[in-house]
Amino acid sequence: MTITVQTRQAEADGNFAKLLRDWRQKRRLSQLDLALMSGVSQRHVSFLESRRANPSRNMILQLSETLEVPLRDRNAWLTAAGFAPIFKTRDLDDPQMGQVMAAIRMMLKAHEPFPAIALDRAWNVRLSNQSFDQLNAMLGDDIWSRVGGEGRNLLRLFFHPDGIRPFVTNWAAVGPLMWQRAQREAEALAGTDMKAVLEELASYQDPHILWSAAEASLVPVIPFNMDIHGLKVSMFAVVATFGTAQDITADELRLETLFPADPETEAMFRAAAQARSQ
């Protein structure tokens, strides 16, 4: 049973103690570790997990912050303990998200002429810049319909057999790393949507390749190398998040920027941007 199924059941049962224990174990911390990190006595942590004490709202927020529980799940903690949820989920076009979205659009635009996207926690592309859209077009105008699903999901783009994989020339090196990163994020963020997509895509993968990454040269970052109809493209990614998010939508947004890994790829993207501007 996944952590999220447990979360929903514990929330329904009003069992805050189970949520606390599950997330503490998920972070591989003892009660003493959590006590030292959170400034709460080990005795009180023990009492909370054994239901011998009830938490205050501030205590829930203090412990969930220490355990780096996503805001969506902090609401579940509050509900399970009998409190109202406090973290909102705003639409991207909500007026209160205006400054956040302005910052994202600014970063996407500033990253031109190289690709950049904003993802939610299920790896759905919520916003993209022109360079990313042009890269997609190089893969085929029907690339997103080929991989299926609703919207533009990066997991499907990477791991569906009709997606980007046939173009990747070093899949044995980067495929396992991407798959394991996706699994870690799904587990760390308790993402049921992401886990469902991974479970669906697992049937397309070669288990031997996914769990035994090919040896790679000792470079700072393993690039993602593609051959798109004879055009060589080599890139690596940098991921950024909001450091002080207090809204679930903002908390779950990730900005993924792609950088050229060689001078030829850099020149190709710069030339493409210049052609678009003419």
Image (cartoon, grey):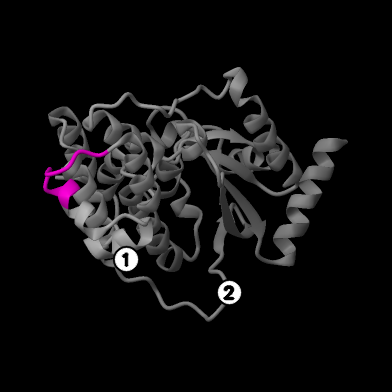
Judge from the rendering whether residue 264 lies leftward or rightward of residue 52; answer left or right.
right
Magenta-highlighted stretch: main secondary structure?
loop
- Find out whether the residues at labels 1 and 2 contact each other: C-beta distance under 8 Å: no
In magenta, the rendered stretch is: 47-55
Q: What amino acid type is highlighted by mark number 1? A: Ile
Q: Which residue is identified by label 1? A: 209
Question: Quick one: label 1 or label 2, which is nearer the N terminus?
Answer: 1
- Do we see residue 160 in this rendering? no
Does the stretch in magenta take in 51? Answer: yes
- The quadrant in which the N terminus is found is top left
Give the residue at x 49% y 32%. Answer: 247
* Structural crowding at the residue carrying mark 2, measured as other residues with C-alpha within 10 Å and reported as few (<14), some (14–19) or many (≥20): few
CA separation in Å, label 1 and label 2: 22 Å
Give the residue at x 48% y 33%. Answer: 152
The one nearer the camera, 268 or 12, is: 12
Q: Could you say where residue 110 lies in the image, as x and y percent from the top left? A: 75, 44
Q: What amino acid type is highlighted by mark number 2? A: Pro
Give the residue at x 20% y 32%. Answer: 11
